[in-house]
Amino acid sequence: MAKVKIDWHTKEAKHLNKDIVLDRFHRHLKSSGLHSSTIELYLARLNAFLEYADCEDPSVETANEYRDALIDRDISKSHINNTCFAIKRFYKLNNIEWKFIVLREDERVPYYFDENDVLAIFSVCTNIKHLAILQTLFYGCLRSSELCRLEDKDLDLKAKTIRLRQTKNGHDSVTMINADCVETLRRYLRVRPQQEIDGKIPLFYTDYLHLWSKEDIHRMFMDYKKKAGIKKPGAVHVFSRHTTATMMIANGADIRIVQEILRHRDIRTTLRYAHVSDKTKREKYEQCLTL
């Protein structure tokens, strides 16, 4: 009698094995003390690699092929480097050594908005909650993830400061806001009911009583950017980080003060913003190069 050939390996079993691998990698990353956003990033990048490899124990040759494929797709160098860092950690967990060349980032001038752009965005925002979010992002020089984690207890309107927990660098910090932002936050808090969500009192929550996510912040900002008629490239990070740094430096702030305000560990990161507008260069040129 002929033997019936059946593949008893179901797709469900395959996915289960991958889930086990990712869960083990997750525990490894947490025990390494990495920031939650880095853990989330590395898990996503490893998951994509395992999907490409179509197995749970891909060889280093497969990793090299995957890296080459990402380069061929003209994906950003930072994306490729972060993917490789994640894969390298995965291999290290399994006592496998994998070496790759870190792609050097292009020395490009970051995009930024000017003062008129920022004022235009504020002016078209008639929702007090959204305006409070936008001004807190901008004047606090915050990342979206930092704003999403804010609680009522982090706000000190009298001192005009905000305490930040679990920043990108893994440390707590304190950032400043100005009087305009304080006044907007006071108006917002007068109409916002205090609400407990997941055992916390968030400073901002959605109309559906959920915590704001980075994706929510992005969509909201892009909507107001469109309403303001701004066609320059850039989203929230450009608005609250690139723009604020550029404006402070253009207005004469010391580069190390800007480094402290933006909470950069490396001064070289801040130096990316040490470019100024043509108008500012012309003013300084006329002021300083004179006989």
Image (spheres, rainbow, N blue to C red):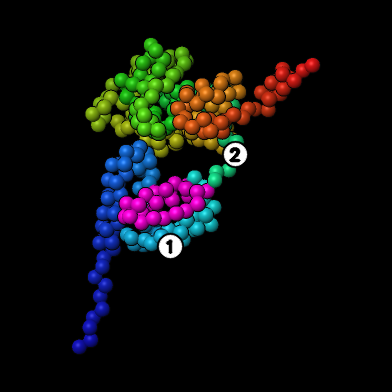
**Residue 189, x across and y down, in percent:** 35, 18
**Residue 123, x across and y down, in percent:** 52, 22
| Residue 103 position (above or below residue 237) | below
Residue at 26% over, 29% down: 197
Highlighted range, magenta:
79-103
Residue at 72% over, 18% down: 288
Report the quarter where the C terminus lies.
top right
Element under label 1?
helix
Determine crowd level at label 2: few under 14, some 14-19, many 20+ residues with C-alpha closer than 10 A.
Answer: few
> The residue under label 2 is which amino acid type?
Arg
Residue 108 has which mark? 2
Q: Is residue 57 left or right of residue 198?
A: right
Residue 287 visible in the snapshot: yes
Q: Residue furthest bottom?
A: 1
Residue that numbered label 1 is attached to: 61
**Residue 53, x across and y down, in percent:** 39, 61
Q: CA gap, disc 2 to disc 1? A: 32 Å
- Which of marks 1 and 2 precedes in the sequence? 1
| Residue 264 position (above or below residue 57) | above
Residue 131 visible in the snapshot: no
Residue at 42% over, 58% down: 63
> The residue under label 1 is which amino acid type?
Glu
Q: What is the quadrant of residue 109 in the picture?
A: top right
